[in-house]
Amino acid sequence: MKFELDSETRRALGYKLIDCIDHYFSSLPDRPVQLPAHERTFGSLGHELPEIGEEAPRVLDEICRELVDKGFHVPSANYFGLMNPTPTYMSVLAEALVAALNPQLATLARSQLASKIENETVRWIGERVFGTPAVPPPSPSVEGASSTPAFAGTFTSGGNEANFSALALAIAAHFPGSVENGVASIGAQPVLYASAEAHHSLDKSVSLLGLGRKALRRIVITDNLQLDTRRLESRIAEDYANGYRPFCVVGTAGTTNSGAIDDLEVLGDISRRYGLWFHVDGAYGAAATFSDKHRHLVRGIERADSVTIDPHKWLAMPFAAGVILTRHPATLRKAFEVSTPYMPRLENAALIDNFKISTQWSRRMNSLKLWLSLRVHGRHAYEELVDRQLTIARRFHDWLEASEQFEVASPMYLPILNFRVKPNGRTEQEVAAANVAMVEEVTRDGRYWISSTVVNGRSVIRAMIISYLTGEENLRGIQDVLTRAANRLSVSRSASGR
Ligand SMILES: Cc1ncc(COP(=O)(O)O)c(C=O)c1O
């Protein structure tokens, strides 16, 4: 079959796909997350490379059916999972439009309106996160003063790339010569700080940036799961005394494990006192700034030199959509700007080419889905989402506190619950085994999804409210399943009663 399709065929295939997606969306409020355990398979497919194509409607029908029937459904309202949401329907439509128009966002010259939309979306996010307009009003006392933007930023493939970019910025700001001459030219080992619970993308980044993984000082956490700021200060002092070059502190707003939020105000103070770059990894939690009622949860984020935020987490976007923001627009250029002869020059452009402020060259338009969702639903819909998910999570938390079988294992900051079976005389190892058995039991029939993890050295069960479709019914459902699983596994029986 040739690539050129006539209008009638295009429309027929398009309607078929829309019907499939529509049917899928209708099923999400109560769709099982995956197949029952005995039907799951993890081998590879063995199809031959197709030499000649097949009938498009049949192939499309088949793949829609197979993916829906056999897939793992992150968008289900019964997914109490990691930080991956149900995408807004507007974002699904935007993705199709982006694929069709295929704008090349590397340069402004080839994507004028698309680049402006990207820039505007970054500005909207930044205004919420930093709480200031991007362009400050001109100062009346300085005639002709040009207004430098208060912040800048760019879309990334996700939090991983955003954190990598942030550390590249911190290095460029602190050791400007190293951009050309490499980290060896610094003459001493640069080091940075993050909590023991901070995301592993930092480990990858420091090694890829040539600093080595040991450069990342993982600071112990307090009982509240926050980076211990006293230990941080003593480690910074120790590092200076031993000839290291501290350059950056990373605070996390919403850890992957538990949603814990570091004390960003104190981290901001410490960073300022020692002259260090302050990065906040708010891949998940920075979206709390979309709620006027709850932005206080990430108080201090506005002091950051850079912030990671992932619209493909709490802002209900499909993959991929991350953003790096910084209060130092010139440093973005310092870290990433290059020039080559094959880029068209635009003399009077007010916007900067994306490739000059980003790790990427060819670049997909990852902003349209959020821009369109915000245009259609407005910021208020996100405010309502944040507020409602916190309310549901609080209800879950209270239910766990009243439970005879479970106990809350760590403080709840955001809509993530860490809990565990009550020890009832079990050793720590037995509690860990019981937690894992609980998760297996709950997820066996495929209807619901929760997970287990280790927080601050202790095994916990983890459940998160992440889908905008998750409501009271789904909450009651997971509570029933947890209770039944606990009864089956007799978790409330004391260890001595075994
Ligand atoms: C706190 C935090 N930072 C960064 C990341 C990396 O984000 P991504 O998966 O979008 O690369 C994650 C992913 O879960 C995260 O939880």
Image: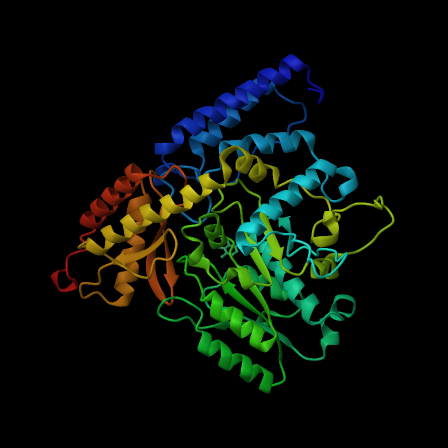
Residue in the picture at 38% in, 71% down = 222
In-image side of 120 versus 490 (left or right): right
Considering every residue shown, the one lying at the far right of the view is 341
Q: Position of residue 309 (x, y in %)?
A: 54, 52
What is the quadrant of the C terminus in the image? bottom left
Side of 342 where 485 appears, left or right: left
**The one of 430 and 450 positioned closer to us in this rendering:** 450
Q: Position of residue 84 (x, y in %)?
A: 47, 45
Furthest toward the top, the residue is: 8
Residue drawn 53% across the image and 40% down it:
318
Corner quadrant of residue 13: top right
Camera-side residue of 33 and 98 = 98
Question: What residue appears at the point 38 percent right and 46 percent down from the top-left corner?
Answer: 387
Q: Above or below — where is 384 with respect to 22? A: below
On the question of residue 254 being in view, the answer is no
Q: Residue at x 25, y 47 (%)?
A: 482
Label tally:
0
Residue 274 vs residue 2: left or right? left
Residue 263 higher or lower than 51, as above or below = below
Instruction: Give the quarter of the figure containing the N terminus.
Output: top right
Which is nearer the eye, 27 or 245?
245
Q: Left or right? Give the position of 481 relative to 202.
A: left
Name the residue at the bottom extreme. Answer: 241
- Position of 363 relative to 329 (above/below): above
Can you give x and y, in whole percent of width and height, for residue 357 in the image?
A: 71, 53
Look at the image and name its color scheme.
rainbow
Where is residue 337? Give x, y as percent.
76, 56
